[in-house]
Image: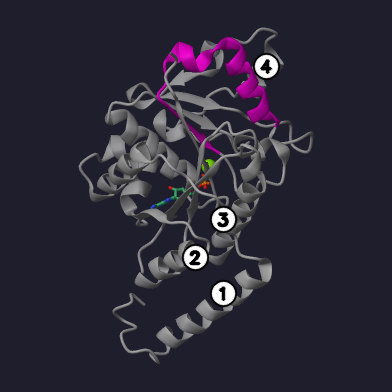
Amino acid sequence: MAKKIKQIAIYGKGGIGKSTTTSNLSAALSVMGYKVMQFGCDPKSDSTNTLRNGKYIPTVLDTLREKSVVRTKDVVFEGFNGICCVEAGGPAPGVGCAGRGIITAVELFKQQRTFEELDVDCIIYDVLGDVVCGGFAMPIREGIAEHVFTVSSSDFMSIYASNNLFKGIKKYSNSGGALLGGVIANSINAGYAREIVDDFATRTQTKIVEYIPRSITVTQSELRGKTVIEAAPDSQQAQVYFSLAKKIAAHEKSETPVPLETKELQTWAATWSDKLLALETGMIPGGAAAGI
Ligand code: ADP
Ligand code: MG
């Protein structure tokens, strides 16, 4: 019997740290002994760079434009510790649906039985912030990925993007779509940042899978074109990514989130604004302890 491949999708606002988190997660899982494929779905096509010394790889869409017959080996490249790296790619700017690369790549791999041939245990789709376009919603809608995780900081725009994602997941939840595994909280240093993401997770009936600090080790490693797992495996930050990887490896049951209505989200944000102002002006004893 074919083994069950764990397929997860990572969504979140642009620039929030999806590719950084995904690459470190892939690297940690591979060091733990799993055969991992990282599937970059952002038209920026830079998802797998830190798994390959900062280098870009040819995308599936570009390769299909150049060659009439495309084989697995033309679009799957080996990265750190044997990770299979793929970039779906995007259309020429301004032409067509930017999500088409994902649809095309997944179809190609199905035809060629790529996942079986490479014997992967886990596929991680590094997707985008919004699920507006059909292609980007595909890993959720078609249930290609089974579990969705969102990367979010405590910034309102990233929470807003996560809440929108939750709406998308809920919409397809009754028709075989992927469900929510939880929130990966990124760039969490101040105490209040943790409280904000915790509160959002509670309100939407999900959980925080891991708190990842903003760390200079990430910046240093990225400047060398590497993940923290490769460049600084003994660092504290690497331990955080290993901890995330263990939780994701063990994760089995995802849930339908309960997104906030737009108005509820606005009220929630306004309440937090008041709380932060009170902390800043010292009206709440213990403001310093809360990390402000
Ligand atoms: P996305 O894929 O969501 O667009 P990236 O993963 O490319 O975002 O991250 C954007 C920038 O933020 C990168 O330069 C990355 O190094 C930095 N970054 C992300 N997470 C962290 C972190 N925890 N600590 C330090 N820098 C980070
Ligand atoms: Mg990215």
The mark found on residue 64 in the picture is 4
Q: Of label 3 and label 4, which has the lower sequence position?
A: 4
Q: Nearer the viewer, mark 2 or mark 4?
A: 2
Q: Residue at x 60, y 28 (%)?
A: 88
Instruction: Give the alpha-carbon distance from disc 3 to disc 2, as whole Å.
Output: 10 Å
Instruction: Give the alpha-carbon distance from disc 4 to disc 1, as whole Å.
Output: 46 Å
Q: Mark 1 sits on what residue?
A: 268
Specify the amino acid type for callout 2: Phe
Q: Does the residue labelled 3 lie within 8 Å of ligand 1?
A: no
The mark found on residue 200 in the picture is 2
Q: Of label 2 and label 4, which has the lower sequence position?
A: 4
Residue 266: x percent and y percent?
Answer: 63, 73
Instruction: Give the alpha-carbon distance from disc 2 to disc 4, as whole Å.
Output: 42 Å
Is the Cβ of the residue at disc 2 closer than 8 Å to that at disc 1? yes
Is the Cβ of the residue at disc 3 closer than 8 Å to that at disc 2? yes
Q: Nearer the viewer, residue 259 or 9?
A: 259
The mark found on residue 80 in the picture is none
Q: Mark 3 sits on what residue?
A: 162
Q: Is mark 2 within 8 Å of ligand 1?
A: no
Instruction: Give the alpha-carbon distance from disc 3 to disc 1, as whole Å.
Output: 14 Å
Q: Give the range drawn in magenta.
A: 100-126
Q: Which of marks 4 and 1 is in front?
A: 1
Q: Of label 2 and label 1, which has the lower sequence position?
A: 2
Is the Cβ of the residue at disc 2 closer than 8 Å to that at disc 4? no
Q: Which of marks 3 and 4 is in front?
A: 3
Specify the amino acid type for callout 1: Trp
Residue 201: x percent and y percent?
Answer: 47, 61
